Structures are given as C-alpha cells and as structure tokens.
Amino acid sequence: LAVEDSASKAFKKEIDALLASPLYTPLQRYQVLTNDRALAEKVPAALFQVTSALLANGDPRPEVLSDAVTSGVAVGQVPTVVDAVVKRCPAKTDTLERCIGWLGQLAGDPTARDHLKTLTDAQLVALGEKRKSDMGNVDLIVRYATLLRKRGEEQAARRIASEMVEFAPHDYGT
C-alpha cells in the first residue's frame, strides 16, 4: 500500500479490501494503516473508520484517540471526535495535557471549546496565583498566554504576552 499512488484505483481497491475483509480485526487494520505514517496521512477516511471502531469497543490507547482526532478533522467528522474526547477526558483526568492537546485541535467546535475551558480553569487559576507573586516572570507569562491560546482566547493571550515587553523591556529574545 505504501508504494501505491493514493489516487490510483488499485490503491483504493486495496484499502476497501482491507476495511471489508473478515480476516482482519479493527486492531490489525489499525496497525496496517499506522505502520507507515505517510500511509496514514493518505487514507484519513479509512483511518477514521478504524479508529472509530476501536474507540467504540473501548480501546484505551491514547494514540488511537490521537489518530481519531487527526483523521476526524481531515474528513470533517469533528462532532464525532469531540464526543469521543469529551468522554475520554472527564473534568478530573490523569492525562490532562493530552486532553488539552486533543481539544485544542478541535477548538473550532463549541462543545470542545467549552470542555477545554472546564479542563483548564484550574490551571489558569494556579498560574494566575503564581503570577501575583512573580509578575515579571517571562516563563509564567508565556505559559499563561499559551494556555489562553489553547482555549481559543487569542485576544486575551496577546494582551498577556504583551506584558513581556513591560516586565523585560531590554530582553530582546522575548
């Protein structure tokens, strides 16, 4: 599959055969499609179909959800992927950074944006408290602005980032 031209009929026939064959489990199909990242990028619809099946069967692996997000966005299935991410990422989660990353890729969707805000509220409060005692800390400013950008609050992120000039006017690297 990797050497075939993705526009050719033979390539499409092989992908369809892989997806329809009773000889393969969804996990085996996933392994075939993701063995070569270039192949996975050529077949987002097939990858989305396989990752959706795996997630529906309760596959806990984060790489499956990552591939579902990427392929779901590519084929216009954002609401379906948002539901999977929200289900996987409750308000209190051990994989907060991964969840924030997935939701950040889906931030155009209102449900994803709302859930992203819920997951990052505590982080913003904690960073805000740290900043009260160290207002000029450029690292804290960058982390705060980055978190605001992930939440889709670009204007607030730009405002916070502009504080670097105020607190470190001669640090030309910032």
Image (tube, rainbow, N blue to C red):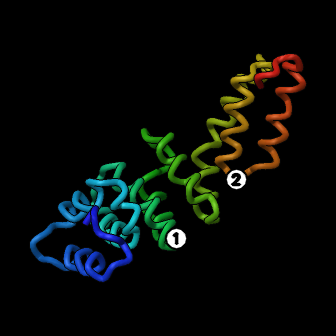
Q: Dividing the picture into quarters, in which one does residue 112 lie?
A: bottom right
Side of 82 where 31 appears, left or right: left
Q: Is residue 10 above or below residue 66?
A: below
Question: Of 21 and 116, which appears nearest the observer?
Answer: 21
Callout 1: SS: helix
Residue 126 in the image: state x and y as whole percent: 66, 30
Please state which of residues 82 and 68 is positioned toward the viewer in this rendering.
68
Which residue was labeled with disc 2? 152
Residue 8's x, y, as percent? 33, 79
Mark 2 secondary-structure assignment: loop
Which label belongs to residue 71? none
Mark 2 residue type: Gly
What residue is shown at x 81% (from left), y 42% (from top)?
158
Q: In this view, does 116 lie to the left or right of 166?
A: left
As drawn, 140 above or below 6: above
Q: In which quarter of the image is the C terminus?
A: top right
